[in-house]
Image: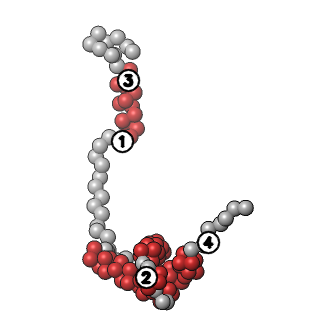
Amino acid sequence: MSETSPTDPVAETFEAQRDRLRAVAYRMLGSHADAEDVVQEAWLRLSRQDPGTIHNFAGWLTTVVGRISLDVLRSRQAHAEASYGDRPPELVVTVDDGPAPEDDAVLADSVGLAGCCACSTPR
């Protein structure tokens, strides 16, 4: 007879809230990747917390996700990322006055046919 370990009630509670927490973070951040990162950070903070001190897991997790999301938003402002409305810098196009690729190929073939040394012995 094998004994199975009891499931972790904190992990079960968190998993039951995961989709809702991800939705809260996504609504605040507008990015699925950032929302997932926030939820993972909330899990890490929950794992370091004494579960006996939390009386309302859903409320505690929502608060933590909201605060982490606000931190992410503040970090975005501090880095001053360009918005979609900003125009990209003008690109400068110049004419290439060098030889055309087919001229390079002809030159390479003629060099290949040249002698290997000063005695002009073909390769």
Tell me the amino acid under the disc marked 3: Gly
The residue nearer to you, when weighing 84 against 51, is 51
Tell me the amino acid under the disc marked 2: Val
Residue at disc 4, secondary structure: loop
Sequence-first disc among 3 and 2: 2
Residue 6 is labelled as: 4
Looking at the picture, how far across and down is residue 67, in whole percent? 38, 84
Residue that mark 3 sits on: 112
State whether residue 46 appears in this view.
yes
Question: Residue drawn at (69%, 62%), measured in percent from left and top?
Answer: 2
Residue at disc 3, secondary structure: helix
The residue nearer to you, when weighing 6 against 100, is 6
Residue that mark 2 sits on: 65
| Residue placed furthest toward the front | 1
Sequence-first disc among 4 and 3: 4
| Residue placed furthest toward the right | 1
Residue 92 sits in which quadrant? Answer: bottom left
Tell me the amino acid under the disc marked 1: Ala
